[in-house]
Amino acid sequence: MHRTLARFRTVFVLVGLVLTFGEVLHGANALSYAGLVLIVGGLVLFFVPSGGTSRKPLLVRSPVRGRWVPVNSPADKVPSHGTHELGQTYAIDLVHVPDPAEVWQPLRKRPLAARPETFPAFGQDVLAPADGVVVQASGWQRDHWSRNSWPAMVYLAIEGMLFRQLLSLLTLSAGRFVVGNSVVLDLGDGVYAVFAHLRRGSVRVEKGDRVRAGDVLGEVGNSGNSSEPHLHFHLMDRPGAMAAAGLPFAFPYESDGETRTSVPGGRTPFVATADREPAAIRSERTG
């Protein structure tokens, strides 16, 4: 029961906001109190899984190529981003660190903020992890400066949790201003892939386009609620994130001299190659 209710967490918050702040229209204190209950209940449900957790990890191709560092990975904790909202239970953030001598740090002392073009991830290709059909694509939001210093991180939290989240709720856009420029692919069998924080103007696909595994969908950017240019990737069980549940996944990569098929974690750098894909995916397409 609670998993079913959790799918409508965002709806509860929206209705609660309308009832609470619409007292001047309906004039009923009881409805305002009911609105507060819905808001609190909806916020609590953000931390309740909404189904999909019983499925085995789905084998896909890596959505990037080259050397990357996994951040906020489901290999380390679930939900990986601290919430089940927007179907991101098993989401992963990928930061491009091409230089093996460089150690990636989430926070820097200086500069307080930097242009997105100064980060190696910015402009990197984002690849389709399997054959699919585009069900959503947008690319008009700007790429902002980084928020990876302590003062900027505080600003990011306020901007993301209040302004962007509230704006997404009020526009019924299922986190549009949180995920930034994005693409959603229908991979079939009730599986949808999400690619977030893409570079403004880089999205190469439109709704209805059919893509093949490895096709370029767009480029890594710094749009939406992002501390620095990176790719946010996750799978979910519905095309609309507002009532979707997250799905686990795995893809092939190389790390510490070994070839693995799992989800990378521990902020351990890995290398993904464009031509490597799980045998299961390859046989399904050719069989």
Image (cartoon, rainbow, N blue to C red):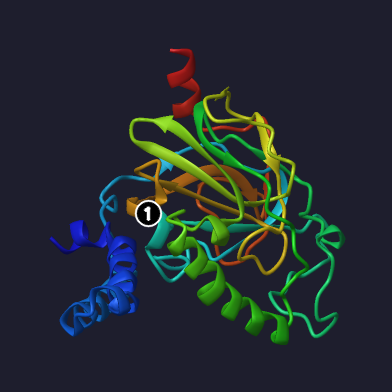
Q: Is residue 30 left or right of residue 229?
A: left
Q: Is residue 138 left or right of residue 18?
A: right
**Which sits in the foreground, 179 or 24?**
24
Query: Residue pushed farthest left?
Result: 1
- Whole-percent x, y for residue 220 in the image: 71, 49
**Circle 1 — which element?**
helix
- Whole-percent x, y for residue 115 in the image: 84, 65
Q: Is residue 273 left or right of residue 287?
A: right
Q: Is residue 18 visible?
A: yes
Question: Is the residue marked by circle 1 packed among few (<14), some (14-19), or many (20+) residues within 10 Å?
Answer: many
Hey, what amino acid is under mark 1? Met
Q: Which quarter of the figure is the C terminus placed in?
A: top left
Q: Which quarter of the figure is the N terminus placed in?
A: bottom left
- Residue at mark 1: 242
Q: Is residue 77 left or right of residue 203?
A: left
- Whole-percent x, y for residue 95 in the image: 69, 59
- Residue under the point 34% across and 69% down: 46
